Amino acid sequence: MLSLALRDLSVAFGGVHALDGVTLEVAQGSLTGLIGPNGAGKTTLLDACTGYVTAHGEVRLGDRRIDGLAPYRRARAGLVRTFQSLDLFDDLTVAENVATGMPGEARRRWWHQLRRMPAADTPVVHDLLASLGLDSVAGALPGSVSQGQRALVALARALIARPDVLLLDEPAAGLDSHESEELGRRLRDVCDRGTTVLLVEHDMSLVLGNCDHVHVLDAGKLLASGTPAEVRKDPAVLAAYLGEGSPS
Amino acid sequence: MIEILQFALLGLGAGTIYAALGTGVVLTYQAAGVINISLGAMGMYIGYTYAFLHNEDLLVLPIGTIATPDLPVWAAMLVCLAVAALLGLVAYALVFRPLRSASGLLKLVAAVGITMVLQSLVVLRFPTTSASVPPILANDPVHFGGLTVSWDRFLLAAVVIVIAALLWVLTRFTRTGLAMRAVAEDERAATLLGHSPGRLSALAWMGSSMLAGLLGILAGPITGLDPVTNSLFIVPALAVAIVGRLRSFGITVAAGIALGMVQSVVLKLQGDYSWLPQTGLREVLPFLVIVVTLAVSGGSLPSRGTEEDPRLPAVPRGGASPITVGATLLVGVALVLTLDGPYRTALTTTVVSVLVCLSIVVVTGMLGQISLAQMTFAGAAGFVLSNLTTRAHIGFPFAPLIAVALAVILGVAVAVPALRIRGVTLGVVTLGLAVAVSEFVFKNPGWTGGMGGSRVPELRLFGAGLGNGGDIGFALFALFAVTACAIGVIWLRRTRLGGQMLMVRANERAAAAAGINIAGIKLTGFGIAAGLAGTAGVLLGYQQESLAFQNFDVFVSLTYVAVVYLAGISRVSGAVIAGLMAPGGLVYYALDRWLDLGKYNAIVSAIGLLLALVTTPGGVAGEADRQLRWLVGRLRRPAVPEPSGEQVAALGEETGHAVSRTT
């Protein structure tokens, strides 16, 4: 279990400042939400943390500075993410997709790489799939299961790595409201077992109903931070994001 | 200094050809999303058509010949341009329209097929392959400031500059041009706005073919006509199109003319300074241009918004069983013992080809990277073997091992650009590399024996000579060696490393998110593939007892990629089928003998390739496997589990998705 701290993180695409000096902390063991209107820079922030875009500023995983490391090294250091577009491996079955996330699988010495690929249906993979209700599609290819199930496969692939910090990019997209509630309970559970979670999400009830702490991003800058109750009342947030109406 | 300028002006002719073909490449890429490497061959073919129409008053069409009255030059040119437009339209309608949503690799392979068709058509339809044409443009010498240049070079350059300017005006200021740019940006959105990408693509194909044809006609007197040399003009043309980011006509034309001039100056320097390499320096330049441009511009070319996400054929699960491998090996041994004469030679050629195809299966089928330079690795190993055995007198097994190790190092070095460059762009880089190495190294008489070829002594094992490709000893040796390699590739598919290669192929960023060192996997994969190709080069040397640069020509690499794609690029069985079908392979040779295709063989196989690409884009092996599975499934009649309500509901929302994926 580690915390994630960003200091003065900036990303520029040409002349556009997608992220402009963001400083925030995701407390150790917390379930933290990151919200903001479209184009606020939420996904860019995840990309900057995980090394998929060139960023300036500091990214710390616990005490260790990880900015400057290649994406795969950050993943091995314990910072694991999912993608909004899920990015499943289309040629691998659901179980195999999940097994690719097994901790240590990728960092074995080279002679182990020439050993036979371990079977995907280990008890660990099986239990995780079962707990997400995916056991019936374990042998199916991702292209043949529903969008909601695909989202869960992506989540499972990240969870099985037992990351110290987990970054989730809209995991509830494609889930119905019942499944979304279930996801919230599950994320709480993940935190209780010792993973720090940063949740980027459009589903307001999922974020405000489950998170310990919420950061609000607008136009590349941190607009507000606080508990869900505080953020709900923050006038700047209301103006920028929630608009006139109340959060649904 | 004045001499340098003189040579620079002499390069204007070649530069103009690059500029024009480069413009054609930009045009087809923008409007049709194809990197059309067949444009060089198109120009060459139209050049021949014009030569025969002008010299013999015969309009030679792909099918049929029309006797014409003695046409004036302008009329003959118009007729030839009409033929060019028609050929462009046919190529689009019959090949690229059906493949419009296929992967970049498939389109590239199709363009290779078109090149092969045009080259074999020339050999078949034009009795003399070295036709000379009287100059069309006035070529009086022009003198100024101590320089003398033939007037036609200026006229040629002017023609191309005017055409490029017209294209620029067309794309900037007309509705069709706007539509073309819109299609290039986002095909789907442009379609929704009522533009027809099909019509635009057809126009672009006709336009670029006419442009290539025009240059083929006008520049024919300057360059001479040759089916291979003229087709290879596409490599410098690709280089300058890349300098123009596959977008700008102006930059492309300027870069083309500049490249021609620099090449000419290099030729002059080569003569002045004997310490400079005396062969191939000119041909290395386009490759350098490609590499430097991509390095400066930061990796890949601008992506073109296509309608669908193109994918490589699926990788089979599991792979071949020991029984299949054993049975194949037994059949091979039986064939070695029963066949004789040229059939046994065809069998050893098959076996060596299988190994080349295996290397393509690893690098493209498993790792997902397009390499058009596999024969370059084979050649490197082959010539090193020749030098080690004949000059340094190092024998088996050390000479082959050193040769293969060198190919591996070369392969890893080539993978370095692949760390940043993907897809068809990487294909273009490797194409440039293949031409550069072929001209610079393989044709260098000091290193490889040049035109005469270099000798490889007979392979001796435990004191006994195994003979060459026609002898049982060597045939068995090659068969067992290649079977061992095939088992290695099957094994690789099942290892952790193989799994990670598939992950890199499927989705690089997700692979990185799973902690996979993508650079490491790519370097390893390229190294393994180059090692396989190098082994094939070594075997080829022992088989033929001599090697020449023609064995490792870029068109040989292109043909192998095309054939293995056709057979099934993501499976080991695909490599075996490809080896049988490849030129000189058993099936190829037997068909040639039985059907007595003779001179029609080349064109029949080229058209067969295109036909198969359009009808079975997944490859023959994949299709056979699918049919077999279906049959087995029908015979077994397994109990189909009743779908749950949830799955049925899921199916509904999934259908639209599944359709977009399978088409």
Image: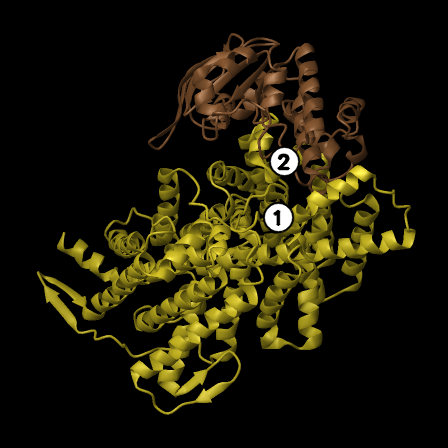
The answer to whether residue A144 shows anywhere in this view is yes
The single residue placed furthest to the left in the displayed view is: B145
Which picture quadrant has residue B596? bottom right
Query: Does residue A171 sit above or below B210 in this rendering?
Result: above
Q: Left or right: where does residue B635 sit relative to residue B369?
A: right
Mark 2 — on which chain does it sit?
B
- Report the residue marked by disc 2: B503
| Residue B633: x %, y % from top left | 86, 51
Amino acid of disc 2: Met
The answer to whether residue A60 shows anywhere in this view is no
| Chain appearing in brown on the rendered image | A
- Which residue is found at the position 57% from the left and 43% from the top? B530
Mark 1 — on which chain does it sit?
B
The single residue placed furthest to the front in the displayed view is: A245
- Report the residue marked by disc 1: B312
| Residue B525: x %, y % from top left | 59, 38
The color chain B is rendered in = yellow
Count neighbours of disc 2 (C-alpha within 10 A) and say few if under 14, some if 14 to 19, many if 20 or more: many
